[in-house]
Image (tube, rainbow, N blue to C red):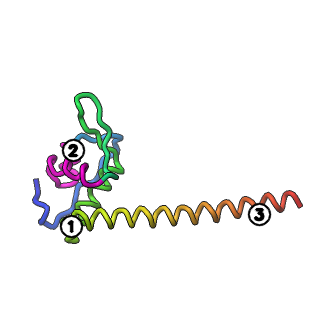
Amino acid sequence: MLEPSQNHELPVIPAKRYFTIGEVSELCAVKPHVLRYWEQEFTELSPVKRRGNRRYYQRHDVLLIRQIRSLLYEQGYTIGGARAHLVSDLVKDDATLSKQLVHQMVGELEDILDILK
């Protein structure tokens, strides 16, 4: 397992639906106990739990973990700073999506208006 401070490329994420904590640990170069800790600190990170409380991460979880890892280990954020950064990113994404939806709805309403004329 590589240390977080080493500059290296992370492996490609395989085309799978679910990943075990061990697989995610290797894909993200983060130890399993760190992943469990991050689950407590970052509410956006919530793997599916099945029999025996086993965690199963999805692709979006792996991508989020890589982003958290980058914020903490490469960009020097604190846990609180990384959390705030992620929340601001989510707010920006929501605003962009809202603008796209409004634009799409206006276009559809204009089409309906043309039909009614």
Query: Badges 1 and 2: C-beta atoms under 8 Å apart?
Result: no
**How dense is the environment of label 2, judged by Cα within 10 Å: few (below 14), some, or many (20 and up)?**
some
Residue 5 % position (x, y): 12, 66
Q: Secondary structure at mark 1?
A: loop
Q: Residue furthest top?
A: 51
Instruction: Name the amino acid, label 3.
Output: Glu
Place of residue 95 in the rendered image (x, y in percent of width and height, measured from the top left): 51, 65
Kindly identify which residue carries mark 3: 110
Residue of label 2 = 23
Q: Is residue 54 magenta?
A: no
Return the residue found at the far right: 117
User: In the current view of this chain or complex, which residue is farthest to the bottom?
Assistant: 75
The span from disc 2 to disc 3 (Cα, nearest Å) is 50 Å
Determine the residue positioned at 20% across, 50% down: 35
The residue where tag 1 is placed is 78
Which sits earlier in the primary sequence, circle 1 or circle 3? Answer: 1
Q: In this image, 114 relative to 99: left or right?
A: right
Q: Could you tell me which secondary element the residue under label 2 belongs to?
A: helix
Q: Which residues are magenta?
A: 22-42
Of callouts 2 and 3, which one flags the residue occurring earlier in the amino acid sequence? 2
Hey, what amino acid is under mark 2?
Glu
Residue 10: image location, x then y, percent: 22, 58
Q: Quadrant of the C terminus?
A: bottom right
Mark 1 vs mark 3: in front: 1
Q: Main secondary structure of the magenta part?
A: helix
Residue 84 location, quadrant: bottom left
